Image: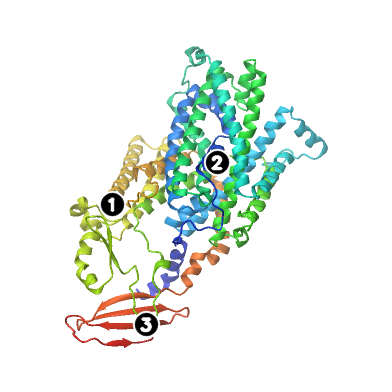
Amino acid sequence: MATCSTGCAPAVRLCQRLNRLKTLDGDMMATSLKRCLSTLDLTLMGVGGMVGSGLYVLTGTVAKDTAGPAVVISFVFAGIASLLAAFCYAEFGARIPKTGSAYMFTYVSVGEVWAFLIGWNVILENMIGGAAVARAWSGYLDSIFNHAIQNFTETHIMQWNVPFLAHYPDLLAAGILVFASVFISFGVQVSSYLNHIFSTISMGVIAFILVFGFMLADPANWSQEQGGFAPYGMSGILAGSATCFYAFVGFDVIASSSEEAKNPQKAIPIATAISLGLAATAYILVSCVLTLMVPWRTLDPNSALADAFFRRGYSWAGIVVAVGSICAMNTVLLCNLFSLPRIVYAMAEDGLFFSIFARVNPVTKVPVNAILVFGILMAGMALIFDLEALVQFLSIGTLLAYTFVAASVIVLRFQPEKTNSKDTTTTSPNVNAEVSPAPSESQTITEDSEEPKQYESFSDKLQLVERQKTRERRGVGHLKAYWEPYLDRLLGDCEPGEVVAFCVMTLIVSSVSLCAVLEFGNEQLQFPVWCFTMLLVIFTSAYVLSLALIWIHEPQRNNQTFQVPLVPLTPGASILFNVFLMMKLSLLTWIRFTVWIAIGLLVYFGYGIWHSKEGLRELQPKDMAARYVVLPSGSLVETVQSVQPDGQVVTSAHQISSPAAPTATEADGNR
């Protein structure tokens, strides 16, 4: 056994390093960035991130090919599913107002290597997303001029026929990204002003589309003669919901901006709710107008709205819609360029990515290096790649981030509050100095009046041991009082939050298994009916049982910041929906995802794990701590230990008399 323990020690230490959590500073508002964003700024950023080219392209595509006029219902379902994920982001953004979004949330609650992989995927998501929007912007503008830009480039510059590459270098898309990156580097206020301008124009054009479109609406386009309201049935509506879900993925820009918000505790939840509500309303009403203006079978998927006005004889209205679509694409582009450098900055600030990206310009208070480098990389992708083959790759990183954030909400909600090491009192080893106990050793007990009382004297510590044992099981992460008589023998010996963490893991595994059976059980795997039914019952039972076991534990109750309602049901439903959508992705997407993860692991084990600030913090000297020990003689001994960098421990002891030992002595010792 000793040999096994010795051999397993390196593996245990490695697992501890991979799963270490980020230590948050006592002052959550302290930052090297500039806190200048208001609730309005964050709301417009959220609207700009969601209401983009999807409004002008996605509505027509889903209506014609997937759901028909029932695309309205598809957007309702997609909006509800997005709201589940948005709740989780809003709680973390208000509670932990630090840049990094899903990366930061995972680092605080799940572990370091998982946080790195989430951040690594979000980086790729933003890079491909920004490049794709830039190419869409370029293509839309080029179509207005009858593809004159493309023809000139292919004739006078170059063209090539290489798989996965564009037929010609899109200089306009690359130039747009470089130009926008320069503007973003001028500061967050410049980015916010540009977003205000484009968002205002875009929302004005949407209002014009709704007013003028309803005037041209013809209810006959929803009649049975035209195929009816839901020609593809419920399956078409659900398939359309899976596609429409990606129209709302831009709300995470609000969480990414939390470190630059003036009052993130209030602004993040409010901005998330308002922006998601506005975006969902815009998508639902515009899809309603579009399918009422012209028959859904005749829609042009590439420019459905503009084409609808042209066909109704209002060519000037089509031009207004084209201007609105370009402004909407600009807002999405700005949001991608705004979020990406801040996630890179957060990872570099923690030591997991190259330190050059953690530098903040002293004048503009933004990570200029990250903005310019990744802006140029994004421009290079837009210049040469045919991004149509990579667009589906966007979704897997987003869904994975949503899943981990939802799981993190559950884990953090049922974890006891950790005492910050910076708050502990450093005590001199001098025996004549009065030593106060470390906060971690003092007992905080909530009285019936719910006023916390700090007990620090020796007598209080001795007298309240039994009382603490009876009260601590109702603390955060313990069984609720009602369930203690029934489950205490089974779960009572577990550490606070340990059962919840295990249940969250079971929740994810059962969700993956359940969705895999639903998606592949009948067709690809061809399970018999009894086997298919049995697997559904087993995995559904595991999912429900995991939620029930989490629910019977005591959660944190914090009324100071926004909290997700109905935990663990809300994040649990978000996990299930995200996993279901991930199962809808193609095999090629999963292969690309695996390759990108492998590259990320090389970066982490080659650089991040060795430069992690959490790892360096573990090597620093520990703060002194006071402990009280009852000796056999009945006297109390207070010991103060300080761990030195070379591993030596300096110990100071005070022996204090108790009723059983009327005389007091003092003893000092170093070892």
Query: Which residue occupies the foreground of this view, 201 or 248?
Result: 201
Query: Which secondary structure lies at badge 3?
Result: strand
Q: Residue 526, image x and y in percent? A: 42, 36
Quarter of the figure with residue 434: bottom left
Badge nearest the viewer, 3 or 1 = 3
Mark 1 surroundings: few (<14), some (14-19) or many (≥20) residues within 10 A: many
Callout 1, which amino acid?
His
Q: Which mark is residue 566?
A: none
Q: Are marks 3 and 2 in contact (CB under 8 Å)?
A: no
Quarter of the figure with residue 333: top right
Q: Residue furthest right?
A: 156
Query: Which secondary structure lies at badge 2?
Result: helix
Q: In the picture, which quadrant includes the N terminus?
A: bottom left
Q: In the picture, which quadrant includes the C terminus?
A: bottom left
Residue at horizontal 45%, vertical 70%?
Answer: 10
Q: Which mark is residue 651?
A: 3
Q: Residue 374, image x and y in percent? A: 64, 51
Distance of label 3 from label 1 (alpha carbons): 39 Å
